[in-house]
């Protein structure tokens, strides 16, 4: 049980800075998720915490103890790897007990703890098998068992679910969360899947290009993204963006979305003059009102039963053409000239249908076009 | 669309045929050697090894009894008996016979031959003969050439002679054990050293590592003949001299570049995550080496062991330079076979047997270890 602190950690490979100014405090018992597109440095950060990569500058402490210069075996952590990294030549029992054996525990004690861990993960009947005789999900549980049997002060998990099929992934996701809650061990979890991050984390660290973009709870990240990147990355589908004028009327700021005038909840003196970038989540868009809003013609309609994703073109002149670079290619389903709305109702929509789209007040996010930071 | 699923490319057949040809190319001489080693010198001279399993027409040179057996029948002096029994040739059916080396099958069985000096001879199919002459026989018995069908016969005499003969010029037993004495340590020592080196070069970070790997690769192309004389002088000057210690060290040194290179390449290919996980689990480098890397590298260790074993087993040059001295007590099999070629060059049965004795151990080693060459130990560790 321990807190984890990164203090201004840097990592560079020659001229290339993989991690810059990484400062983070993780509370004891937190489930902290590092999330970001591939190559954002999240795995490097985890490996530095594990001691598998050296830091270029800064310090890392676990439970108040500076571990920056310690080897991975001395940091009292356990790690679960993406491909499980089971020892293929050992039985499940020896795999789970390996860490304890390396620490010189006596045999009876190791056996007792391995049995207990196997019990927790329902692996008891597989203890004498080799990893190759196990299914993907079982291997994954062995990897977890190897971590929990040591009772370390922190778990580090590097995309442990990415090799499972979709159904098993959802199931294992909740198993890991429950396990972590029960054991109360501080956990750092790396993933590129924002759904995993939102559902599992008590604290999310969004990273991009080696720099932390925002740290916060899932709700905070969803409701108050710090910049365009976080807004576009978090949520499924991500936030819609459009360019709009900033107008002041009666001391209140407003913008336009097609024909609709959209009042803003941001005080006028914080807004840039002329234009700003606005964001609205697909689930906040109001579709199909009789009056108000702006009429659009639906492009693609993706139906998932009750839930439907409606595609429609961004109103003329309001598309942001540089957005692709900002958000990254994570959301391949759309380009910057298309907006998405997520609706849950019993109405049927068809391609080419004309509907009215309205932006409700108070749900519109405003971003500075220069810095891309959120304004509020 | 020839290469959609279900259609074999015609190239597959070319591959299969080439493989079959290669197998035959290697197998046939070995089989010939094996068969020849169980045959007698006469059989080898009479027919090829492929005829060994079948009965064959063979020409025997036999001799009748001498004047001691002579009896007098009226005017004639007569010698009677059974040609086959007297010569210990066994129970054969004579198909033809002759009294002159020029025409060994001049007469059919039962016919009477007229010979020089008024002698006549009658030979029956079962070998009974009657030799008559107007004058008393003198000297040795008459030579008779007999053609008979001999059933296939295999003998262990060659092996007995090669393996258990006390004659040091012929016996292979001593050389066999000497070779083992050279080969086993010369295989184990380089593996032990190279495995440690390979682990360090693959998984431990230290300055100059890449340079060391490059040096090892460079050493692969240095011919060992270059080092023979300097190394022998070194051995003599530090007091090792000629002997087993010297030959072990030489084989170790010459095998090391290949061993390090092979093992390092294999170890580098082991999944990084497994080794990192062991580090997080608290294992030291030595523990990672002995408990994770070494067991997982078994296929590479086995394949190098086979290489090194075969190479040291078949080696003549290094043994000649570093081991064999004037006393001849430390001779090895390759050397012994060379000697046999000189002294018993005509005796193919001896040479074939010696050769087969010398390849038997490599064959056993190969068949015992080859499954490790094929088996992938890594299945199931990473997905």
Image (cartoon, rainbow, N blue to C red):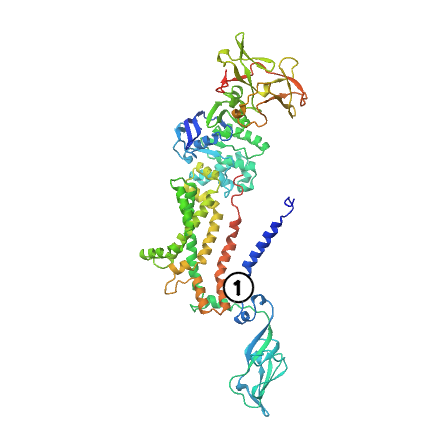
In front of the other: B142 or B14: B14
Instruction: Give coordinates of residue A278: x percent, y percent.
Output: 54, 18
Q: Is residue A185 visible?
A: no
Q: Which residue is mark 1?
A: B33
Residue that extends furthest to the front in the rendered view of this protein: A317
Numbered disc 1: what chain?
A: B
Residue A332's image quarter? top right
Residue that extends furthest to the bottom in the rendered view of this protein: B75
Task: Look at the image and tell me in which quarter the C terminus of chain B lies.
Answer: top right
Residue that extends furthest to the top in the rendered view of this protein: A250
Could you tell whether A126 is left or right of A8 in the image?
Answer: right
Instruction: Give coordinates of residue B316: x percent, y percent.
Output: 43, 60
Indicate the secondary structure of the residue bearing disc 1: helix
Q: How many neighbours does mark 1 have within 10 angstroms: few (below 14), some (14-19), or many (20 or more)?
A: many
Instruction: Give coordinates of residue A235: x percent, y percent.
Output: 56, 24
Instruction: Give coordinates of residue A364: x percent, y percent.
Output: 55, 16
Instruction: Say which residue appears at 54% left-offset and 63% top-offset.
Output: B32
Task: Look at the image and tell me in which quarter the N terminus of chain B lies.
Answer: top right
In front of the other: A244 or B155: A244
Q: Is residue A75 visible?
A: yes
Q: How many marks?
A: 1
């Amino acid at each position: 049980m321990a807190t984890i602190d990164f203090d201004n950690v840097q990592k560079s490979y020659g001229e290339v800075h993989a991690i810059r100014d990484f400062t983070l405090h993780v509370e004891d018992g937190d489930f902290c998720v590092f999330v970001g597109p591939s190559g954002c440095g999240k795995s490097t950060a985890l490996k530095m915490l594990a001691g598998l990569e050296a830091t270029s500058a800064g310090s890392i402490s676990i439970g108040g103890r500076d571990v920056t210069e310690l080897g991975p075996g001395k940091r009292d952590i356990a790690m679960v790897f993406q491909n499980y990294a089971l020892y293929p030549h050992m039985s499940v029992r020896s795999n789970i007990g390996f860490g304890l054996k390396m620490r010189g525990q006596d045999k009876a004690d190791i056996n007792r703890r391995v049995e207990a861990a196997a019990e927790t993960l329902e692996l008891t009947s597989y203890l004498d098998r080799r990893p190759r005789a196990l299914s993907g999900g079982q291997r994954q549980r062995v990897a977890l068992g190897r971590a929990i049997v040591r009772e370390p002060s922190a778990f580090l998990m590097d995309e442990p679910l990415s090799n499972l099929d979709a159904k098993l992934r959802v199931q294992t996701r909740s198993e890991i969360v429950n396990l972590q809650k029960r054991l109360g061990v501080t956990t750092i979890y790396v993933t590129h899947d924002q759904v995993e991050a939102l559902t599992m984390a008590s604290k999310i660290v969004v990273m991009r290009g080696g720099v932390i973009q925002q740290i916060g709870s899932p709700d905070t990240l969803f409701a108050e993204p710090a910049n365009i990147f976080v807004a576009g990355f978090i949520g499924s589908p991500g936030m819609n963006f459009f360019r709009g004028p900033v107008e002041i009327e009666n001391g209140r700021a407003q913008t336009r979305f097609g024909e609709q005038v959209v009042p803003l909840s941001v005080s006028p003196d914080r807004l840039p003059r002329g234009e700003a970038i606005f964001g609205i989540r697909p689930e906040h868009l109001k579709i199909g009102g009789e009056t108000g809003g702006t009429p659009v013609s639906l492009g693609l309609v993706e139906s998932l039963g009750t839930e439907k994703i409606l595609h429609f073109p961004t109103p003329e002149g309001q598309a942001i053409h540089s957005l692709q670079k900002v958000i990254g290619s994570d959301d391949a389903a759309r380009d910057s000239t298309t907006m998405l709305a997520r609706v849950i109702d019993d109405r049927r929509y068809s391609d080419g249908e004309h509907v009215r789209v309205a932006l409700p007040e108070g749900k519109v996010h405003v971003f500075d076009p220069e810095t891309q930071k959120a304004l509020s | 669309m020839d290469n959609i699923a279900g259609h074999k490319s015609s190239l597959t057949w070319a591959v299969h045929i080439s493989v079959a040809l290669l197998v035959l190319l290697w197998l046939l001489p070995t089989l010939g050697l094996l068969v020849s080693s169980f045959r007698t010198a006469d059989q080898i001279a009479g027919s090829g090894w492929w005829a060994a399993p079948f009965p064959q027409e063979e020409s025997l040179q036999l001799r009748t009894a001498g004047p001691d057996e002579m009896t007098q029948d009226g005017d004639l002096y007569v010698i009677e008996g059974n040609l086959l029994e007297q010569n210990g040739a066994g129970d054969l059916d004579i198909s033809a016979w002759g009294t002159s080396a020029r025409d060994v099958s001049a007469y059919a069985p039962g016919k009477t031959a007229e010979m020089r000096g008024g002698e006549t001879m009658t030979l029956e199919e079962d070998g009974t003969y009657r030799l008559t002459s107007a004058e008393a026989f003198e000297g040795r018995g008459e030579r008779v050439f007999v053609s008979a069908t001999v059933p296939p016969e295999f003998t262990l005499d060659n092996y007995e002679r090669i393996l258990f003969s006390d004659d040091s010029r012929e016996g292979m037993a001593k050389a066999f054990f000497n070779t083992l004495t050279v080969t086993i340590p010369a295989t184990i020592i380089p593996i032990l050293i190279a495995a440690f080196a390979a682990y360090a070069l693959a998984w431990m970070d230290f300055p100059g590592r890449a340079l060391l790997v490059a040096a090892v690769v460079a050493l692969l192309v240095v011919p060992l003949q270059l080092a023979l004389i300097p190394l022998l002088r070194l051995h003599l000057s530090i007091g090792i001299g000629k002997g087993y210690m010297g030959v072990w060290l030489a084989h170790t040194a010459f095998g090391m570049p290949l061993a390090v290179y092979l093992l390092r390449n294999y170890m580098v290919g082991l999944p990084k995550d497994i080794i990192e996980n062991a580090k997080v689990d608290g294992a030291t480098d030595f523990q990672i080496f002995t408990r994770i890397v070494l067991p997982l590298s078994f296929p590479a260790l086995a394949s190098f062991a086979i290489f090194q074993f075969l190479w040291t087993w078949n080696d003549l040059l290094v043994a000649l330079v570093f081991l064999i001295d004037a006393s001849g007590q430390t001779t090895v099999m390759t050397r012994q076979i060379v000697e046999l070629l000189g002294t018993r060059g005509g005796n193919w049965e001896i040479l074939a047997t010696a050769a087969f004795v010398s390849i038997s151990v490599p064959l056993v080693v190969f068949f015992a270890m080859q499954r490790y060459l094929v088996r992938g130990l890594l299945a199931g560790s990473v997905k």
